[in-house]
Amino acid sequence: MKLISCYIENYGAISEREITFGDGITEFCEANGYGKTTIASFIKAMFYGLDGYKSNTKEFGDRKRFYPFSGGQFGGNLTFEFNGDTYKVERFFGEKSETQDNLVVFKGGEQYYGFDGKIGESVFGLDREAFERTLFIDATDIKISSTASIGKKLEGILGGEGDENFDLAAERLKTAAGMYKKSRKANDYISIEKRTNDSLRAEIENVSAIKASLEPKYSSLSELKKDGGAIAEELKFASTLNETLQAWETLDRLTEKANGLKRELSLKRAEYPSGVPDEKDLMRAERALTEITALTAMSDKESEDVNSRKLDYLSEKFSIGVPGADEMAEIEQLIREYQAADEEYLAVPEYIESETKKEPYKNDKFKPVAIVGGAIALIGIVALFFSGIVGGGLIAIGLLAVAASAVISVNQKMDALKTEVQKERVLNPEKQRLKERLTEINRPIERFFIKYGYKEGRYETRFALINKDVSDFKELQAAKEIRAKRAEKRAEETERLKSEIKEIFAAKNVTTDNYSETIKSLRRYAFEISALEKRCKSAEVEAKEYAEAKNLKERPAAEKKDVEALIREQRELSAQVTALEKEIRDGEWEAERLDDLVALKAKSDEKIKEYTEKYKLLSAAAEFLEEAEKSIIEKYVGPIKRGFTKYSAALEKALGEKVGMNKNFEISFEEGGKERSEMYKSQGERSLVALCFRLALIENMYGGEKPFLVFDDPFVHLDNEHIGKVIALLNELSAGFQILYFTCHDSRSLAAKS
């Protein structure tokens, strides 16, 4: 067989990687961390799955070690060729439990169920442990021994029967012989049976004596039973008499119970001498009462109606009367007139302008200025004679004053010739007239609204409100009349229903004001009467049936008998009979065992003889088996030993000299005249021993189609010389085996050494 390819979805640190395997040797020489061990573990997991574990498991198995914490499906697929067919295994694993795993196998592209989930066992004929001890070779496990699975595979190849475990068979024969006879302890079959035989002989003698003592006991038992019969007859008569008298006392109690119930029923009926209405009449009264309640509730509801409250409000508002249609029309007309007058009033201005003439105003206050100016000019003329400058200045000032006064005077005179006209604002008489008109119209309108209590708001708003209230008032009055008629009808119906209830109660002379409680009381009374009647009838029937059942027709004149003394005497006699009967039964049982004991004694004699013969046969068979084992070991172990010697000679001649191998395939070497276990070898030598042993196993286990071999860097302990020999051997093996070789160092690389 051979591996073709694999695809790792997620396994350890490897994700989404496809690997193709070639014929001969496929080498993975990569640095640590590349995933070489991960790939090797993945291939093994595809064939054998992964062991589950629990949260408290301390062992760090492959499922826990290679679970992908980055997420995604845990697993992938492996394609291989076996017996000329191509198979593809798809396995995905849960985090902890094998129950979460998913396995699908395809053969030639179609799903295949032939492996029944055990792919490695079916393909290699080995369980997982045997696979790891043979086809899967690493540096961590160099244990050299066989397993049950390897042994079974070898037995099939070498022609064994499958059950030839000589040590176990010889041990079982010796153990079986020891069970029949031992040299020291007396707990073997023969010793035990001899003790049983002696015990049976003693027991036979004892039982024979017991059988002889039974006859006198039979006579004593007969006499005791006669005495017991006489006492039993006397006790029976006394018991029958007492039972009859006791039955009469019970009948008296039952009769008194019936009479007491009759008296109670009579007293109860006296509460209502005329009786009570039957259930049909009570239901009629109850229905009538329910209708009365409904009618009353309806009246209460109408009295609480919001419209009723509004009617009361409007009735109070229109207590002086409801405005008529003419009055309402008149007020509506006045409101329209008022609105029109108000609009006209607002359009007219409140003030107007008026023109008046004024008399001219005369002002002569500038005349003195002219006079003074003239005087200054005269003084200037005089001053000329003394100083030309001063005189000239005074003359100039005086003339200026006279001239200014003249100009002003002329202007005033011109103004006086004009007529002064003055304008002023005065109240508009039209506005006043319209205001008086508004007051005149407003007066009847206000009187109307004040009369009916509508004092606030605009006229049109108040008119609309009073108009609505008048309309609502009329509607509510009409509705009130309708309710009054309905109330009158309800009152009439209520009186009719009350009369019906009174008639029902009056028929039985029942008077009451509380109909509801009376109906409940009458029902309770009727129930109590009915219950008492049933109890009376039941008590009478019980007394009658009891008298008939006990056949009580005439009371006996005798008194009760004291049976205690008779019972004590009977018990004492019965105890004697019981004790004697037990002695007889025990004796008879012992006597009946006599024949069985004799037969058992005869069988015991035969067993002693049989056990002695079996002991002789088993002892002889054990001796024969030991001799036979010696000749078979060479046939079973010899091929493995020869294969080991062949491979070890190719690697290290020293390992192949004087090699010993026992029936469990444990290897030993003779050194210095002493035989030593391979455990005394160095790590490197033990690696070679383990490799040679596994190659010898594989050579003998697989005669036809060769399996692939996985080498997970198993030669880390070898020096360069031995590495070269191992690589040469592997290259030679690759002609017949597909080899997957994993290493992390160039010194152990097959390609580098080739």
Image (tube, grey):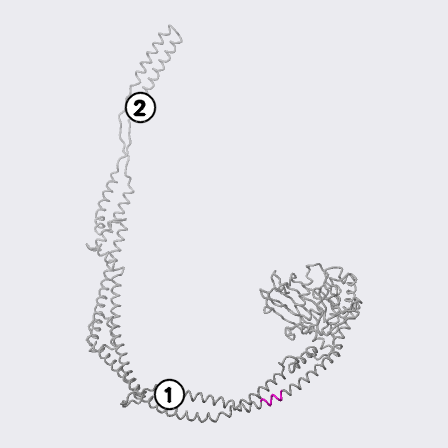
Q: Secondary structure at mark 2?
A: helix
Q: Is residue 242 above or below residue 385?
A: below
Please identify the quadrant where the N terminus is shown. bottom right
Relative side of 663 to 222, left or right? right
Amino acid carrying mark 1 in the image: Glu
For residue 35, which numbered disc appears in the image?
none
In front of the other: 682 or 566: 566
Please identify the quadrant where the C terminus is shown. bottom right
Determine if residue 279 is in view.
no
Q: Residue at x 29, y 19 (%)?
A: 365
Q: Secondary structure at mark 1?
A: helix
Q: Is residue 536 above or below residue 326?
A: below
For residue 569, which numbered disc appears in the image?
1
Determine if residue 582 is in view.
yes
In front of the other: 168 or 689: 168
Relative side of 668 to 403, left or right? right
Magenta stretch in the rendered image: 600-607
Relative side of 741 to 255, left or right? right
Residue 168 image offset from top left, x and y in percent = 68, 77
Question: Is residue 602 rendered magenta in the image?
Answer: yes
Residue 238 image offset from top left, x and y in percent = 33, 89
Amino acid carrying mark 2 in the image: Asp
